[in-house]
Amino acid sequence: MKNMLNLYLLGVVLTLLSVFVRLMDTLGALVESPLPGSTWNTRGQLTNTESPRGLPDHQSRGVQ
């Protein structure tokens, strides 16, 4: 009877481990290539954005 309980617990542990590994693999794939239309930005995408503009030139305010 104890042997059957050990086999059952081993099966449960292996199943949970398999689910955990699959979940981590899926999360890793999402980090590497986010879905199109996703609002999440990666570090590489953040470096390609435009830099914020500074103060406008004096000429644009009509000051000469």
Image: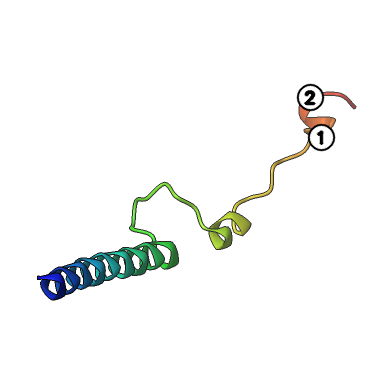
Depth check: give the residue in front, 18 or 22. 18
Q: Quadrant of residue 28?
A: bottom left
In the image as oriented, which residue stretches furthest toward the top?
62
Give the structural element (helix, strand or loop) at label 1: loop
Q: Which mark is residue 61?
A: 2
Q: Is residue 53 above or below residue 18?
A: above
Assess whether mark 1 and mark 2 are in contact (beta carbons under 8 angstroms): yes
Q: Quadrant of residue 8?
A: bottom left
- Which residue is identified by label 1? 57
In the drawing, does residue 32 fall left or right of residue 2?
A: right
Q: Which mark is residue 42?
A: none
Q: On the rendered image, what quadrant is the C terminus found in?
A: top right
Depth check: give the residue in front, 23 or 48. 23
Q: Tell me the kind of residue under disc 1.
A: Asp
Residue 41: x, y in percent? 49, 53
Q: Quadrant of residue 29?
A: bottom left
